[in-house]
Image (spheres, rainbow, N blue to C red):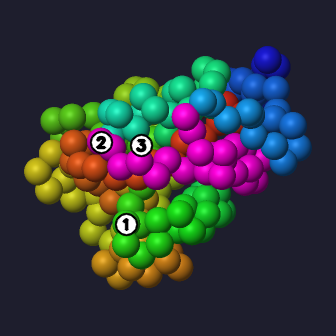
Amino acid sequence: MRMIAFTIYSFAIISFAMADPLPQGKCPTPVSGSNPANYHHILGRCYYFQTTIMNFTDAMDECTTIFGTPGGRLFEPRNTEVNEEVAKKASAFSGPANPRWWIGIRAVPDRMPRHFYYLSGGPFTSLPYGYWLPNEPNDKGGEDCVELGWTGGFGDDRFPKWNDKECSGSRLSICEQGHEVIW
């Protein structure tokens, strides 16, 4: 593991750890019971498109083991390019029938104002990027988890956006493995 530090404005230091990169264009050997066709290398990371519908907690647990090593997690989109490229691949798995996928963002329950964060960073970090549907997040009754879906009633696959949802709901999920960034 390599450690790299950058100094910003001479006062603050931001550090991040980069795991050794995956072999170019490759994902790790699929774990027993997973579908090898669901592993895809996109923009330098490996993703697994879990087509078994489950609640947020189960999806989170599944992602920690789907790569056969520590480091798997629910997909944490950190910019529009990554969000859209991974969503394009997800739409090929789900089609228009079930275009909703759990991603690795959630809110601190019962906190006002709402505070969303990446799971890898924990609740004391801020979400530096957002790609929300219009009028979202809206917290209609304990919506503390985030799904990736599509505008126009989730049927328009041109613009994948985020929506807050109850964590107990059943969704497909996107797992990722690759360079780790600690904010």
Looking at the image, tell me whether mark 1 or mark 2 is earlier in sequence order: 2
* Circle 3 residue: 105
Horizontal side, residue 151 vs residue 79: left or right:
left
Looking at the image, tell me whether mark 3 or mark 2 is earlier in sequence order: 2
Q: Residue at x 81, y 43 (%)?
A: 26
Label 3 CA crowd tier, 10 Å (few <14, some 14–19, many 20+): many
Q: Quadrant of residue 99?
A: bottom left
The answer to whether one can see residue 11 in this image is no
Where does the N terminus fall, quadrant-wise? Answer: top right
Position above or below: 157 against 103 = below
* Circle 2 residue: 55
Q: Quadrant of residue 28?
A: top right
Query: In x, y percent, where is residue 34?
Result: 57, 39
Mark 3–mark 2 distance (CA, rounded to whole Å): 14 Å
Query: In x, y percent, where is residue 12?
Result: 65, 25
Instruction: Give the residues in magenta.
Output: 33-55
Secondary structure of the residue carrying numbered label 3: strand
Secondary structure of the residue carrying numbered label 2: loop
Position above or below: 3 against 21 = above
* Circle 1 residue: 98
Looking at the image, tell me whether mark 3 or mark 1 is earlier in sequence order: 1
